[in-house]
Image (cartoon, grey):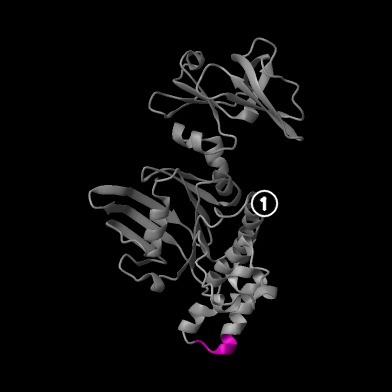
Amino acid sequence: MADLKIRNLYKNYGAVEILKDINLDIKSGEFVVFVGPSGCGKSTLLRCISGLESITKGTLEIDGRMVNDVAPSKRGIAMVFQSYALYPHMTVFDNMAYSLKLQKLPKEKIKQMVDAAADKLQLTDYLDRLPKALSGGQRQRVAIGRAIVRDPKVFLFDEPLSNLDAALRVQMRMEIATLNDSLPDTTMIYVTHDQVEAMTMADRIVVLRDGIVQQVGTPMELYENPKSLFVAQFIGSPKMNFMSGPDAEKFKATTVGVRPEHLQVANGDGAWSGKVIYSENLGSDSYVYVNMGADEPVIIRQEGKSDYRTGDSISFSPRDNLYHLFDDKGLPIAH
């Protein structure tokens, strides 16, 4: 079991406050993702959990034990970094076995543990290779394998896929999700700036901004019921469309937010109108970009192929009451 409890956690660098009054409960076996823009404090929070950064104020408990002053190696955690951090002169086997050798375990036990982790990660055929002979995805699997062999209570992932190309990222997302299923008692905390990773992998998402937790919930809770304009802006791909000024006044709000898939084209009598500036046909669906005179175009997602061309006038509305209203403080308004 590996419950985490964070209470009133602050992290300062001198007079600069990086994390501000963080309160979180993470249950054993959960896959929790920290997301937010660059500089929001998500990696710092992960490093505070790992022990690589000290906590300025507040408490961190793992399995009911306060670990504020416990060394990283004694916390029962394993961390996977963005940079892989493999030893280039060691084989895959020796990289994965390194921490076990430091524990002076018997050779037979080390081989058994490494072989079991390699089998989980489909690395058995690569155990005699050096890291330079591996692809980026294989190197990341080795880094994960090195963490698995330690049998940690908690896995910490710090943007582990950001160095991989798009296809490998999808593959590694599936592999990490499969790994999570195979280790049901191990808690996993994953940091990313990519909200697609968060939406597809997390049991719960923690959205951070300027060192403050904005909202915690399942992916669909955040997607369907954002508690602030910021969360609404951050979650979803393509991101939510926002109308303000006169375009929002008819809804008695400062800002109206509608997701691209929740907009439908009307026959001249829609809530809004504009001119098509671009249309993307992706096969199964298409994206129509509409200029309404704002800084960013409105995106309408349609099933199948779009027949709209640059310069076409278009009118559109939210469908089925699927829109979000926000006041001048960025807080939601019921409708």
Q: Residue furthest left?
A: 15
Q: Is residue 220 left or right of residue 330?
A: right
Could you say where residue 53 lies in the image, as x and y percent from the top left?
Answer: 34, 61
User: What residue would you read off at disc 1?
Assistant: 167
Q: Amino acid at mark 1?
A: Ala
**Regarding mark 1 in the picture, which secondary structure is present there?**
helix
Where residue 93 sits, quadrant-wise, is bottom right
Name the residue located 58 percent from the left edge and 70 percent from the top edge. Answer: 145
Residue 75 belongs to magenta span: no
Magenta-drawn stretch, dominant element (helix, strand or loop): helix
Q: Is residue 228 visible?
A: no
108 magenta-colored: yes
Q: How many marks?
A: 1
Determine if residue 82 is in view.
yes
**Residue occupying the far top of the picture:** 268
Above or below, comparing residue 181 to residue 39 in the picture? below
Which residue is rendered at x = 46% and y = 19% of the image? 253
Q: Position of residue 125 (x, y in %)?
A: 70, 74
The residue lying at 57 percent from left, 86 percent from top is: 109
Give x and y (percent) for residue 264.
67, 22
Residue 183: percent from the left, percent from the top? 59, 66
In this image, 13 relative to 211: left or right?
left
Quarter-of-image position of residue 284: top right
Q: Residues within 10 Å of mark 1 (few under 14, many from 20)?
A: few
Say which quarter of the image contains residue 291: top right
Q: Classify 48 as above or below 300.
A: below
Q: Which residues are magenta?
A: 105-109
